[in-house]
Amino acid sequence: MDNFLYIPELNPVIFYDTTRANLPKYFTHHFENWMFPERLYPWQQREDYHQIWQTTDIIKLQFESTFDPIIVKLVDQYGIARITLPALIGLPNQYLQGTYAFEVSMSLAGLPKGCYRLQIEAGIAGPLQKILISDKQYISDVQIKNTFLIEYKNSRYHNDVMFESGIVFQFRVHGNIGFLEPIRNDEKARDQKYNPALLNSRTSRQWPMYFGDQFGLPDDIVNLLNEIWSCDNVRVDNKEFGIAGNFEFVVVDRYPKRGVKLLVEEGINRNSRIFTTLADTTKKLVTSVIVDAHVFGDTGNQGSSNTIPVFNIINE
């Protein structure tokens, strides 16, 4: 029986097979299989793309697999592993028969700035082991200005991801928000003298959101953004947003990256600014019940995470 490893496209990092190759009769390097610099056509400008992170970020990944072990490593430019985490087996996936969800939560705190790659080692070392590697990941130990930290999840299973595990993905990308575009829905009437009267009015707020710096984004990152906005909970720099329009692009001839624009609106439309001393009022209220967590497997991370939970901060 063959082993299968599914890497949902909602993961914030894209992985490629190190043994990939095109048969001589095929020329096209599709973005699912080839890194950005390898996909460029001869007439396109030579460009590169580094995915960006800060040491304040946490890279969260989920895979669906019929086998283990699955090891995730962060390797530096010399191929030396700086972080090694075993992916923890968790929920069985009822939609992909025989598979289980595996998760990793990788804190980047304390890493020196520089370029890295993420590497997956699936299976026991040997001829049947599958090695997958990401494109370049630039990690900064200082704040990267004009970037978004996008945190996203879904209320239930979605696009091959078991969100029932509680995972909330993080993804950082260059971006900025444009000018406010107020919207309103009015119900009006006129009397016998044709005087106008406002019967009901509802207001909301929209903004154009721009992704990518002055050099734009490659197709695989555009695809990831499209996947992210299919989730029903998307937070951009700790604020809820919902999609309100289609993607628009700025294209330059022979340049292999594009500027991206998306119209968004507030995910929570409130008529007041709410303040409290005990809770984050920017978040939606969510309740859930788990009858017996042992049914779903071990709730400890067993080394699959190098994060340290903080339950309370006391200022004295």
Image (cartoon, rainbow, N blue to C red):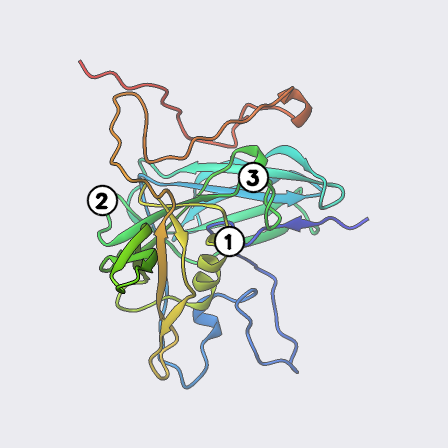
Q: Which sits in the foreground, 182 or 257? A: 182
In the depicted structure, whether residue 220 falls above or below residue 59? below
Question: Toward which corner of the image does residue 275 lie, by quadrant?
Answer: top left
For numbered disc 3, what is the local secondary structure?
helix
Ranked by sequence position, the earlier of labels 2 and 3 is 2
In this orientation, does residue 51 appear?
Answer: no
Q: Which mark identifies residue 294?
A: none
Query: Is residue 28 found left or right of 172 in the rendered image?
Result: right
Residue 26 position within the rendered picture, expressed as x and y whole percent measured from the top left: 63, 80
Under mark 1, the amino acid is Ser
How crowded is the residue under tag 1: few (<14 C-alpha within 10 Å), some, or many (20+)? Answer: some
Q: Which residue is mark 3?
A: 163
> Marks 2 and 3: which is nearer the front?
3
Report which residue position mark 2 lands on: 142
Residue at 41% across, 86% down: 43
Q: Secondary structure at mark 2?
A: loop
For label 1, the residue is: 230
Residue at the right extreme, as displayed: 1
